[in-house]
Amino acid sequence: MVAAAFRHPVGIIQLHGSLSDAGSASKCGHSSFRFISKNFAVDVALLGKGHCSYRQGQQHVVRALSSQAQTTCPSSSSSHVESALILIRHGESMWNEKNLFTGCVDVPLTKRGVDEAIEAGKRISNIPVDMIYTSSLIRAQMTAMLTMTQHHCKKVPIIMHNENRQAKSWSQIYSEDTEKQSIPVITAWQLNERMYGELQGLNKLETAERYGKEQVHEWRRSYNSPPPNGESLEMCSHRAVAYFKDHIQPQLQSGRHVMVAAHGNSLRSIIMYLENLTSLEVVNLELPTGLPLLYIYKEGKFMRRGSPVGPTEAGVYAYTESLALYKQTLDEKLY
Ligand SMILES: O=C(O)[C@H](O)COP(=O)(O)O
């Protein structure tokens, strides 16, 4: 692959394509135009400050306009990639409300959990999301869907059904345009809450009274003590972190922005991996329900950026140039 380049009054625009992609550009808006060639068509938005943006597959690409055309493909080596990772624990569930151990029991959100997810969605509404991963449990899936109702990109999150050939074929989308307006949602049991064994369904306070506060704290927060017939955080981390490394990290490496909606303990184990926490440090890691956490993945490293307090928080978008440009594109579309 090389870049197709063409001259536009604002500069030379280079897009991925093949050399045969000689095409033409026609204006289709105040600051956008459509490039059409024999092989592909793409809508390009001019961002000002010498940049343009367009979509390539699931990816949102921002490029600098150059005064000279290059004939080589812009590097996609991982050292240049910068992507956003949002982690969010589901909103309050009906068993959180009752203070019951939940684990892998599939319980929905409360009204408050719904509101938390909507509030979280507002906070991340200007951060790019190309793909969503959730557990196979409804509380995480509800949270992911509700957050996206607030997102300024207005894309539709769609659950991928790849469990068998028929499910895959029956859930096909036959319009390229419609597909471009959607965000794939991948569900994975590996991101489920830790299996809480014989504590599932028991009241947390009553269990502490029965077995002692310390014992229950150890079951809940230690790295390697499993609750009776359940998973320790270490056991949970084997599946959750392996899934993250095999499926999610490669997406970030290829420049896709990812949101992961999961659970207190599957996310604690992923955060332990991202931040290199020791088994002692993770004991103090508490994740509130419905609070989005932003990380930037760059040069093979994860940088924690905390939780955006609101969609207009200037600081969030200053973290990286591409986030700033993404927000600028959204603002230009909206206002
Ligand atoms: O499964 C549960 O009960 C909670 O979602 C997480 O519980 P914890 O705070 O006891 O780990």
Image: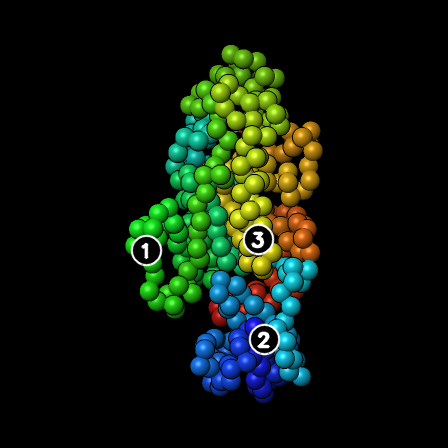
Eyeballing the image, is 145 above or below 174? above
Instruction: Using a 10 Å C-alpha cutoff, classify the residue at mark 3 as few (fewer than 14 neighbours), some (14 to 19) or many (20 or more).
Output: few
Q: Secondary structure at mark 3?
A: helix
**What separation in Å lies between label 3 and label 2 (alpha carbons)?**
23 Å
**What separation in Å lies between label 1 and label 2 (alpha carbons)?**
33 Å
* Residue identified by numbered label 1: 169
x%, y% of residue 44? 51, 76
Instruction: Using a 10 Å C-alpha cutoff, classify the residue at mark 2 as few (fewer than 14 neighbours), some (14 to 19) or many (20 or more).
Output: some
* Residue identified by numbered label 2: 2
- In the image, 16 versus 120, the foreground residue is 16
Disc 3 or 2, which lies upstream in sequence? 2
Disc 1 or 2, which lies upstream in sequence? 2
Kindly identify the residue that appears in the image at 56 percent across and 68 percent down. Answer: 61
Residue extending furthest top? 210
Residue 250: give its label. 3
**Front disc: 3 or 2:** 2
